[in-house]
């Protein structure tokens, strides 16, 4: 695995790109929020990169005391731009817990379309939760002037 840190976009954010191979080339792109003492505060990353179908998913987590500052939206925008511009992917998905309104605000702010609900798709603490699937196509990202 090879890793490198790209330029800092915000004093707290550094974007880490990990490249690895396993059969077909795969790549995982992540952004980790760290402060002066490098305390973990949040993360945004791509998962399930599918080269055959030219798509990926973006996931994120942010500590409660750092929410509401637009940090995750900003990091997701960078990851989406990278997915469409550099990786030449056609589709990006985000999955959010149906009841997690703060998480659902991220893809909605970015212009993603709500595409459906996957029932009992994830385990949270002591129970299953349903996920809302949001999708964005490269052509839609371009049409909105974001590319």
Image (cartoon, rainbow, N blue to C red):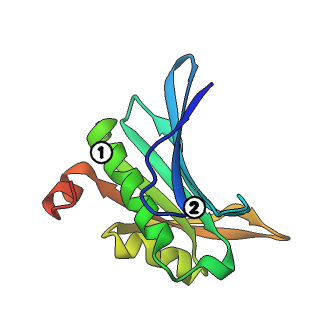
- Residue drawn at (67%, 79%) of the image: 64
Report which residue position mark 2 lands on.
60
In the figure, 20 relative to 100: above or below?
above
Q: Residue shown at 45%/76% (left/top)?
A: 70
Q: Where does the image place residue 104, in percent across and percent down from the top left?
A: 49, 75
- Tell whether 120 sits left or right of 137: right
Q: Nearer the viewer, residue 68 or 35?
A: 35
Report the side of 6 relative to 23 (left or right).
Answer: left
* Residue at the (34%, 66%) spot, across then down: 112
Does 36 appear above or below 147?
below
Residue found farthest to the top: 23
Return the x and y of residue 72 as percentages of the image width and height: 50, 68
Tell me the residue that label 1 is attached to: 84
Provide the secondary structure element on which disc 2 rests: strand
Closer to the camera in the image, 49 or 8: 8
Observer-nearest residue: 79 or 93?
Answer: 79
Whether residue 18 sits left or right of residue 80 in the image: it is: right
Q: Are the residues tagged 1 and 2 within 8 Å (C-beta)?
A: no
Q: Residue at x 38, y 75 (%)?
A: 108
Relative to 119, residue 89 above or below: above
Which quadrant holds residue 53?
top left
Of 130 and 92, the residue lying toward us: 92
SS state under label 1: helix
- Badge 1, how many Cα within 10 Å: few under 14, some, many 20+? many
Residue 26's disc is: none
- Decide: is 115 above or below 31: below
């Amino acid at each position: 695995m090879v890793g490198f840190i790209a330029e800092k976009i915000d004093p707290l954010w550094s974007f880490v790109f990990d490249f690895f191979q396993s059969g077909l080339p795969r790549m995982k792109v992540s952004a980790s929020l760290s402060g002066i003492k490098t305390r973990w505060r949040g993360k945004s990353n791509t998962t399930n990169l599918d080269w055959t179908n030219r798509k990926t998913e973006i996931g994120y987590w942010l500590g409660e005391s750092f929410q509401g500052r637009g940090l995750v939206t900003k990091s997701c925008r960078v990851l989406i731009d990278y997915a469409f511009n550099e990786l030449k992917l056609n589709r990006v998905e985000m999955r959010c817990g149906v009841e997690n309104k703060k998480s659902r605000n991220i893809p909605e702010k970015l212009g993603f379309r709500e595409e459906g609900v996957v029932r009992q798709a994830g385990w949270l603490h002591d129970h299953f939760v349903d996920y809302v699937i949001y999708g964005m196509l490269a052509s839609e990202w371009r049409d909105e002037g974001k590319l």
